[in-house]
Image: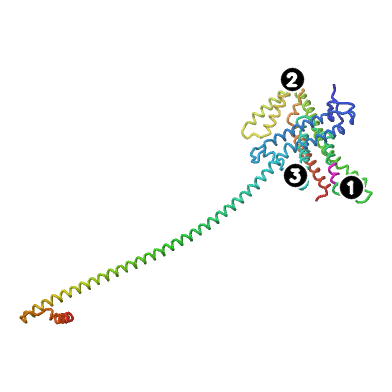
């Protein structure tokens, strides 16, 4: 079976646009607008009708989120960078929601390097601004000659490596999640066709499986029957039953083309590749943003 | 129409620029609709708590002041009461003593008057007796002398006699 792993799908193209030449409206852009709408909607929902007395769960959630965000920024940057709380919060929320879009079978805007590079460039501009501000132009230029002038090329590379590594780390993790997710779906679909093709080709095999499974289940109803009997019984019954389903006259064709193994199992792997990886990458990106800006400002 | 895809790892300038703009818009929206509102509420709560504390402190100071005042007033009232009681006692004592004195004086006066009366009565009685005795003596003497004694002539003699009798008795 062939699987294709592609970049963002191009939805529309406009040629002869000034400055850009041909521009493409990709899935990335569409999804990032959807993410923005979702995030803004959530913000409006959380932020409306707050009272000093508090009381509602919604307000408690809103306050918890903002307090955690402030604690995060204060913990990493101290109290002098409060103006970056909105930036860090926006990047974090957008990143998480974008990463989790993959869970719903939609394209993650963060599976496109352009998205992360855009964020990383904003951070890079801020870092450079603070380096210039704290050391002056002279100090900034001199820092490239540290410790001796021979290191200048390395220092230049490392300067640009900051945004590149930030962008690539985030992109790579999300992309790998998408790729592995796609591979798992494809592999399970192939396994599913192979299994039910083999079992379903013989009425006897599937019939035996159903009967054996039912017998095991009946036995397992006894008081102190071992647990494996129940599990194996259910497995045999389900596999045999589904195999029989593919032989039915009307629904058989549909059942035969349905990758049954894709139901449920990928949820387990996506727990790591989508949920964990998605959340941790958003967290890492924000942590690096705060720490790099603080380092550039030269405050201890 | 078959779908057209971008390559897997690529940087699209238009997407890049749009994402940067999106990020700034998102930052603004996030700040405008959530952060500012929550911070406003948190600040208001903090201010309210501060106000509450200040008010509580003021109320406590006021209560302390009232209590001190009350205690002062109480002490004053007690002192005044003591004073009143003491002065009342003093007045009562003085009054009773005065009354006693008056009573004693009256009693003494009454006694004196009674004594005077008694003395007067006694004197009167003695005089009456003297007169009677004088008369009797005259009659006796008349009988004895057989003649009428000139009362006026012998009056001095009789009186002397009676005086002697009185003294002897």
What chain is tagged by disc 1? A
Residue B166 shown left or right of residue A9 in the figure: left
The kind of secondary structure element at disc 1 is: helix
Q: Is A65 inside the magenta-drawn segment?
A: no
Q: Is A129 inside the magenta-drawn segment?
A: yes
For label 2, the residue is: A252
The kind of secondary structure element at disc 3 is: helix
Residue at x 77% of width, y 43% of height:
A83
In space, the residues marked 1 and 3 are separated at their CA atoms by 31 Å
Q: Quadrant of residue B13?
A: top right
How many marks do you count on the picture? 3
Q: Is residue B149 above or below residue B61?
A: below
Pointer 1 and pointer 2: residues touching (CB < 8 Å)? no
What chain is tagged by disc 3? A
Residue A166 shown left or right of residue B47 in the figure: right
Residue at x 64% of width, y 39% of height:
A55
Residue at x 52% of width, y 57% of height:
B73
1 and 2 marks on the same chain? yes
For label 3, the residue is: A72
The residue lying toward the viewer, choosing from B62 and A110, is B62
- Where residue B43 appears, as percent x and y from the top left, is 69, 44
């Amino acid at each position: 079976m062939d699987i294709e792993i592609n970049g963002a799908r191009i939805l529309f193209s406009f040629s002869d646009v000034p400055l850009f030449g041909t521009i493409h409206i990709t899935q990335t852009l569409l999804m990032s607008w959807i993410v923005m709408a979702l995030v803004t909607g959530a913000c409006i929902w959380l932020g409306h009708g707050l009272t000093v007395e508090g009381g509602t769960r919604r307000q408690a959630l809103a306050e918890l989120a903002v307090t955690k965000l402030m604690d995060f920024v204060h913990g990493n940057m101290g109290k002098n960078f409060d103006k970056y709380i909105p930036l860090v919060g926006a990047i974090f929320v957008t990143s998480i929601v974008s990463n989790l879009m993959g869970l719903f079978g939609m394209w993650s805007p963060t599976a496109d390097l352009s998205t992360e590079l855009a964020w990383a460039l904003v951070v890079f501009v801020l870092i450079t601004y603070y380096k210039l501000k704290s050391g002056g132009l002279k100090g900034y230029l001199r820092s490239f000659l540290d410790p001796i002038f021979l290191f200048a090329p390395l220092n230049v590379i490392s300067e640009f490596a900051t945004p590149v590594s930030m962008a690539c780390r985030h992109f790579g993790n999300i992309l790998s999640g998408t790729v592995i997710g796609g591979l798992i779906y494809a592999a399970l679909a192939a396994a599913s066709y192979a299994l039910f093709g083999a079992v379903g080709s013989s009425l006897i095999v599937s019939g035996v499986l159903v009967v054996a499974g039912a017998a095991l289940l009946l036995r397992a109803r006894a008081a102190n029957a071992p647990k494996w009997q129940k599990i194996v019984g259910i497995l045999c019954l389900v596999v045999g039953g589904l195999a029989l389903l593919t032989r039915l006259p009307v629904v058989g064709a549909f059942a035969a083309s349905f990758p049954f193994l894709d139901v449920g199992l990928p949820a387990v792997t996506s727990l790591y590749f989508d949920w964990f990886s998605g959340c941790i990458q958003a967290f890492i990106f924000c942590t690096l943003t705060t720490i790099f800006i603080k380092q550039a400002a030269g405050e201890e | 129409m078959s779908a057209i895809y971008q390559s897997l790892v690529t940087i699209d300038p238009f997407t890049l620029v749009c994402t940067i703009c999106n990020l700034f818009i998102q930052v603004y929206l996030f700040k405008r609709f959530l952060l500012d509102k929550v911070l406003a509420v948190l600040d208001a709560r903090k201010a309210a708590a501060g106000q509450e504390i200040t008010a509580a402190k003021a109320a406590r100071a006021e209560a302390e002041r009232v209590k001190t005042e009350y205690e002062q007033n109480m002490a004053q009232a007690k002192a005044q009461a003591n004073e009143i009681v003491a002065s009342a006692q003093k007045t009562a004592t003085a009054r009773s003593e005065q009354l006693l004195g008056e009573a004693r004086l009256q009693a003494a006066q009454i006694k004196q008057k009674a004594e005077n009366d008694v003395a007067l009565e006694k004197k009167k009685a003695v005089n009456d007796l003297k007169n009677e005795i004088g008369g009797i003596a005259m009659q006796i003497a008349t009988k004895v002398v057989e003649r009428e004694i000139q009362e006026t002539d012998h009056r001095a003699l009789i009186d002397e006699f009676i005086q002697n009798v009185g003294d002897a008795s």
